Amino acid sequence: MKGKLIALLLAVVVGALSLVTLREHWTVNPFANEAAYTYISRVATDSDGAIYAITDSKKAIRKTNASGKLIYSVSSADDADPNTITLYSSISADEAGNAYALETILDSYGLRVYGDRIVRISPDGSRIEPLYSTNYEAADNLLRVGNIQSLSVKDGFLYFFRKDTSSASLLKLPTDIAGGAPQQPEVVRTTEMANNRYLNEMTGNDENQFFFTSKRGRLFKAENGEVVQLYPAKNAETQLNFPVGIVAEGSYVYFIDYHDAAVKRLDAGKPESAPETFLTFDQLTDIDPKVEWSDFTSLTATGDRIIVATGDQIVALSPAGDVLSYETGYHYPQSDMWLKLGYWLLIVAEAVLAVTFLRLVYVHLFRRRVFLLLKQLALIIPVVLLFMAGLSYSVSHSVSAEIKKNTDSQLKLLAGNGRYLVSGDNLEKLNSPKDFRNEDYLTIKQRLNGVFSQNGESRDGLYNTIYRYMDGKLYIIMDDDDSVTMFQPFPVSEDNIRVLQEGVVVSGEWEDSTGQWMYALGPLYNSEGDIVGIYETGKDMTGISKSTSEIVVNILNIIAIIGLVLLFVITLMTVYLLSSIRKLRRSVNLIASGEWDVKVQIRTRDEVEELGERFNMMASSIRQYIQEMTKLSNSYFRFVPQPFLKVLGKKNMTQISLGEQTNRRMTMLVCNMRQFTEFSKTLTTDENFRFINSFLKEFGPAVREYGGFTSRYLGPGMLSMFPGEPGEALKAAIKLRETLETYNRKRGYSGYEPIEIGIAVHTADVMLGIIGEEQRLEGSVVSTAVELTLELEKLSGKLGVNVLLTEDSLRSMKKLPPGSYRKLGSFQMGEEQQTIELFDVFEGDSEHIRKLKQETKEPFERAVELFRSGRFYDAREVFVAVVKKNRYDLAAKLYFFECDRYFQEGVSEQWNNALKIS
């Protein structure tokens, strides 16, 4: 059972470790096989048609194959450094299925950029290796967006752009480099920018040509060091259209036009040509009416298809503009479902193993009893954990709500003060992207920078955005990091309408492909008192959630420590209170085990001490009673031995009744003093009694030592019964011979003559029971085997044998006796025709006699066999040789005389090959 418990415990531990290791397979519904895309920001594809999407507001990358089956999903949090937030900003893939992702490392508020890192993700998502990293200083004034962008793979190289103040550099890394240690990329080409160009986005991986946009809504081509404006035409009128998300494929440049709610493209080889509309918002709404025009997030172009990503959909189009596929989600591999189902089965198996283990512990280790301490802890621990969980939830909920409440109040206050920070008159003068960083733009920007430092750490995570209200529409004008294009249309929501129409400050939360935010909106007025725009300030919810989580974790740690201390104190108090009860229990166990002199000492000055005093009184009474009963019981056992009762299946004399009997195979040992009749004549009656008692006192313990009991006394001798193995009776016989030597030495010291005893051991079925009448009972053994054993003891003297053993006893022994015994042959007792095989055990003889019998054992036993086969002459000659060597061997002499008689007179027809003893 111990091995089974250990095996079960190991199984439970292995199961628990497996549940922890495989916890990513946990799901409430293991049969759910599909999931929807949420908040897609970037998409890439490879030659096999696999889709690599940055989703969940830049927090995850999911790869699906051409059929929409999920290959892997990796989280930016897995690669995040302590006290930072990591978001994915760009992605590309090579022909081998490796993904290359740009990670932007932000501060804990999700605002200031600490650095950019490019990592390679293996085709199955099992390895993420860093290839390149760069760090930024606070003086770089980078908020939310770093200087690295536009990853692309071509001809075994990874290309990307690095944006500086007045230049753009195309860099490349070989895709076959070993990951693990950041590499230094090769600068392919650096293009200097004009002072008023204000670089925005870049794309391309041709060493001689790439494309870029400026903050003023211009699209340029840089080729062999020359820069050509592609869009809008140089002589075009002022417009609000702004190219976003540019991507080059062949001779075309694709971009998103938020103003026209369309994806457009233009032929880079024809700078003067107007862009053509490739995909319109109306086309998307025909497929899915839920799509919003602001949901355009990413473009990816390959030779055979163009991938357009919205917030929750991925649309694949042919170069002709035909829709090839429309994906709103992905499905898990069949193996994933089996793994999730397997995880549930593992939970069930762990529960079954745990219950089985606890049941075995309860049944076999605790013996269906549970310690009081465990009962109390089993009640206290769940209650404490329940209250801790409730307190943790209450505290976390309260902390989160309080943080949000304080943040909301702070944002409302700042949004309300926006009218004093931003001049509505300056805002009204900004009419197109061409006004980026003009005098009015810089006036507004400087006012904001005077209040909110560009250093992300000193801004407490706050951001600012200004919207222009013009012609009934809302446009984004500026943002902290200038990452949002100027005059990008912004949907007019209910919150915006309230600010514009009622002039109130409104707050709320939202999530899109760029992240999660808390915000507050306040109206902006011109000098005439008209609302001309909206001032927005807010915080990244990722930073707020992380701060809340850290506070909650700290609170939970404190609560856990308090809970552990509380459990320790409760356990300590319980152990102290139970110590007195354990004293009582130990005392009761001692009394139950026969330790009557028990007295418990309890000094708790309470009810338990009083119980201890009553226990001592009870123990004293029991002790006195037990002593009296023990004396009485011992007196009974003097007349009826306890082993005799045990053979009858009784515990004490009170259970004995007349006629109790049992038939059982037992070993009988008869030990008697030889020539006692002649010896007793030399003693008085009183001396005879004293001698007999001293004899029995000396020899009786040897019988009890080996599990026997005396059934009947035979004067200076006894009939003993052995319920156990016959070998124990033989050991007792040898012990009696050793006791005789000691006894005779004592007699010699006192001047008395030594005595001799004879011992016979025989095994047979006997009837043990209670005989007598109601007023006088006696335990007795009834069997002809008893009489036979008595006769055998007498025969032992004639044969000169000290310990005579029957064949029945020898065969019944589990282990044969030592080598100091010899076969005496077959004997016929009196007129009975039945014969009995006898053995001479000379282990207890004197050393001289034992040596002689050992030396003559082989010829003696050979002579016995000759006698039994009727070869009396040959047997007589061998017996003569035995007697010549051992003149004390009475058995050999007796055989000699019988052989001589049978040789001369012959044997009768009734002779049964046995030596007849009369």
Image (cartoon, rainbow, N blue to C red):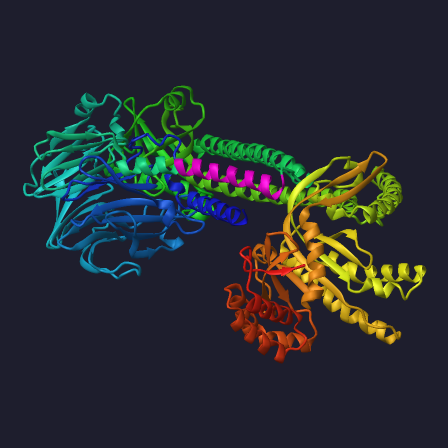
Please state if 169 lies on the left or on the right of 109 as rendered. Answer: left
Please state if 714 lies on the left or on the right of 54 as rendered. Answer: right
Figure quadrant of the C terminus: bottom right
Residue found farthest to the bottom:
885
Is residue 363 inside the magenta stretch? yes
Name the residue at 62% across, 42% down.
366
Please state if 586 lies on the left or on the right of 401 as rendered. Answer: right
- The percent coordinates of residue 740 (x first, y second) are 77, 68
Q: Is residue 236 visible?
A: no
- Considering depth in this image, is 137 or 381 the residue closer to the camera? 381
- Considering depth in this image, is 218 or 759 the residue closer to the camera? 759
Residue found farthest to the left:
270
Q: Is residue 279 visible?
A: yes
- The percent coordinates of residue 383 (x first, y second) are 62, 33
- Considering depth in this image, is 412 or 428 the residue closer to the camera? 412
Residue found farthest to the front:
905
Span of residues in magenta: 345-367
- The percent coordinates of residue 463 (x first, y second) are 40, 39
Main SS type for the magenta part? helix
How many numbered dots are placed on residues in this image? 0
- Considering depth in this image, is 170 or 179 the residue closer to the camera? 179
Q: Is residue 725 above or below residue 480?
A: below
Is residue 532 inside the magenta stretch? no
Q: Is residue 161 above or below residue 532?
A: below
Residue found farthest to the top:
501
- The percent coordinates of residue 807 (x first, y second) are 58, 58
